[in-house]
Structure formats: C-alpha cells, structure tokens
Amino acid sequence: MNSISSSPVSSSVSSLVCEAVVIGAGPAGLMAAQILAQAGVSVHVFDAMPSVGRKFLLAGKGGLNLTHSESMEPFVSRYGARQAQMAPLLEQFGAPQVRGWAQDLGVETFVGTSGRVFPADLKAAPLLRAWLQRLRSQGVQFHMRHRFGGWDSAGALQFHTSGGDISVQGRAVVLALGGGSWARLGSDGAWLPWLAARGVATVPLQPSNCGFDVPRQGGAVETRREFLQELIGQTPTPAVGWTAHFAERFAGQPFKTVALAFTDSAGRHFSRRGEFVATATGVEGSLVYAVSALLRDEIVAHGHATFTLDLLPDHTPERVLAEVRHPRGTRSLSSHLKSRLGLDGIKMGILYEQLGKERVADPYLLAAAIKALPITVVAMRPLDEAISTAGGGTFEALDDQLMAQALPGVFCAGEMLDWEAPTGGYLLTACMASGVRAGQGAAQWLAQQARD
C-alpha cells in the first residue's frame, strides 16, 4: 500500500502543551484539524501509524467511494437507529459538501451508475496528498508513530513513542481513534476502556459490513470435543463452513444478479438485489454488507439468522416452475437448467449444496428453492476483518457539538462513535461530517475559554 508522507514532527521533550490536539489521522481527524486550523487555532495531530490516512488509502484500491448522490431522506435512512443523531451532522456536511471539498482541493468527482460518487481518476492518493498540503500550509503539525495510551493521573494525554513516553496537554482535544476493524491500519479499539473509566458511556464494538459463516453440513452431530466442552460448562464453538466440494470449487466466486430477503424476529425487513461472494466458510460482499446489521443482531439474539436468496429475480415463480418441469429428455438436470433458465456455475452449486441430490430432483422443491433458497448463518467474521464497526462512545454521552459531557474540552468524531452504515460512501461521509462538527465544537470551546 502506498503511504503519503505527512512531514512528521517528532517531539524531543517529554511534555508538550498544545492549543488543540487531534488524535487520529484518518478522515474524521483530518477534517477536525482542517476546521480548527481555518478558525486560526494551532493544531497538533497525533497518530500511531508512520503515515496518515492508511484506511483512506486502502479504500482507494476500490476506486475511493467518497459519498452517494441520493437525496437527503434516503441518505440519512442508511444510518438506521442513529438517524436522528446523524441527520444534523449530514445536513451540515453531506454529499454536496464532500464533493465541494474535493473540488476545492483540485479533484473532480463523478456519479457512477449506482449513484456512488468517486474521484475522476478513481484514486485516493492524489486527494490525500492535496489535503495534507493544504493542512500543512495552514500550520497543522503532525506527530506520527505516537500511540495514544490514555490519560495519566493528572489528566494529561499519554503517548508511547520509540524514544519514550511523552505527556501532552491540550486545551481542546478531538479524539478520532477509529473503530476496531483493520487494527493493522491503526484502529484497534484500545481506547474503549479508557473512555469508560473517565465516565464516558460506551457500548462494545461489533462487526459491521462484515461477512458471515454458515453452519457446516451435518454440524448438528455432536463431536467428542463439543461433548466435553458442554460437560465442563463451556459453550462449544459451532462448526462452520460449506462442504469441502463447494468451498474448493466456488470460494471466491460471486453470486451475480440475485435478490436477498430477510425478516428478523422483530419484524424488520430487508429486500434488495445485488451481488455477493461465497467464501470458504460462508458469505460476504456488498449485498451481504447491506443487511449485515440485521443479521448480526439476530445472531446475537438467537444464535442464527436465515435469509432467502432469489437466484433468478427477473423470472416469476410460475415461469421457473414451468421451465424446471419442461421435459428434458436425455439431458442431465444441470444441462437442462442451464439451457432453460441460464442456471449454472455457483448458482447450480448452491442448489446442490443446500438441497442435496435427492431434493434437487424434485421439480417443485427445486423451483421453490430457485426463487427463495434459505441460507442460514451462525457467526459473524472476526471484528478485525470487518469493513467497519458498530458500537463505541454513545451520543447520549456527548453534547450537540460532540463534546463528552464527562470530559469538558474533549470531543469525539468518526467511527469511534456508536453509529453504523452500509458501504456506498455513507461511512466516509459520516466520518468527515462528524469531524467537521467536532472541529467546530473544539474551536468554539477554545474561543469561549479565551473569553472567560
């Protein structure tokens, strides 16, 4: 992965006093630093990584989906249970403002066929480079390879560096520490207990926009290890994964032009067309990510979740049944379905995987499965594999400017806050919007302190 130099500043002293401290050099932290600098505030940005925007650059490998072009009402709806808290931030700095910000840095954007917005060159590095040049010109100072270690007994910020620990006092502090996914890029969630210990309400981090594992075929048969685990009071880990045949042949291949439907036990419903990918142990990809919050919550509550997959969403059930029942002569069933319905490859493989040879031969069962194939998932992929995370600092612990009520002068922004959204530009837009609000709040706090 390419890195972007941020002209790191190293402190040779064991303590430092700053007007404003921003911890975290991702989009939320950089945006907070920009707002503060524009207000004439002296800003110091600290980050554990050797260079800034590591996750931002990783997102650029897929073209850097900056935001989404849909209108405000559906845009805000993507934030689920946190719509009320996110709406004011997005009204102030939403999709139009993201595009304007990029243009101001000399980067044009365009709207793709899906409504997603990308830089014209589909690259993250030029945009990040221009942003850093702007920040440096505004006097923002960067301290890289400074890992935040919480607060000391006197309330000073602690940072671990290769040259030893340093203590930093900030008259205003913006925390933009990220969630808990992709820890190797800097967001490891280590800050959660530090906030909680200082009176800021938090909720545990959970995977969001994540993949899921399916139960292994025949997994209901109790193994000796599971029996012993139950005997000593441990909950056995469920066996997961497709059959070896399906995994070896289809892992990594996409399900294209399918529709996924899911209704959870609380009656919340999801239905959408799209694509996703089979993995060795289950499913992942954009369509799965879009429903991941509902699937995750159902698994947490009940241990499993079952969605249905329409393999041929452009065909009516009546047509599918008619084609399945059409005489096939000496042709194999696979050849027949490929000829009559265009079913082959991974779609045919999943039918055999879920139904077995005997039930696939029943035309009524097969036709029903083609239109609504049940897929059960029993576990989320690990937190560190997720694209983003839910959980973190609660909005109830913050004021309207995202200042922690228990920590005057300390503001929170980005993915460390308790919100989630699907991929599609919603994550990046919300991170930047919260950075704007926290930066404004910190600037106002400093101005008020100066007046007092």
Image: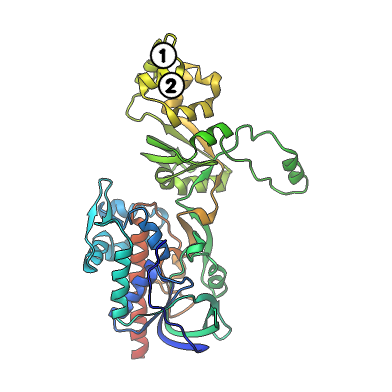
Relative side of 279 to 35, left or right: right
Circle 2 sits on which residue?
Answer: 367
Task: From this view, report whether residue 151 is shown above or below residue 358.
Answer: below
**Helix, strand or loop under label 1:** helix
Task: From this view, report whether residue 381 is shown above or below residue 243.
Answer: below
Relative side of 218 to 93, left or right: right
Query: Residue 39, image x and y in percent?
Result: 29, 81
Which residue is rendered at x = 40% and y = 25% of the image?
Answer: 343
Query: Residue 43, image x and y in percent?
Result: 37, 81
Amino acid type for the residue under numbered disc 1: Arg
Q: Quadrant of the C terminus?
A: bottom left
Q: How is the image coloured?
A: rainbow
> Can residue 300 be spotted in the picture?
yes
Asked whether the beta carbons under mark 1 and mark 2 sit within 8 Å of each other, the answer is yes
Between 184 and 310, the residue placed more toward the observer is 184
Query: Residue 171, image x and y in percent?
Result: 42, 85
Cα separation, mark 1 vs mark 2, equals 9 Å
Which residue is rendered at x = 45% and y = 83% of the image?
Answer: 10
Q: Which mark is residue 58?
A: none
Quarter where residue 414 is shown:
bottom left
> Can residue 271 be spotted in the picture?
no
Query: Residue 341, image x and y in percent?
Result: 36, 22
Circle 1 sits on which residue?
Answer: 325
Amino acid type for the residue under numbered disc 2: Ala
Quarter where residue 55 is shown:
bottom left
Between 302 and 416, the residue placed more toward the observer is 416
Mark 1 residue crowding within 10 angstroms, few (<14) / some (14–19) / many (20+):
some
Mark 2 residue crowding within 10 angstroms, few (<14) / some (14–19) / many (20+):
many
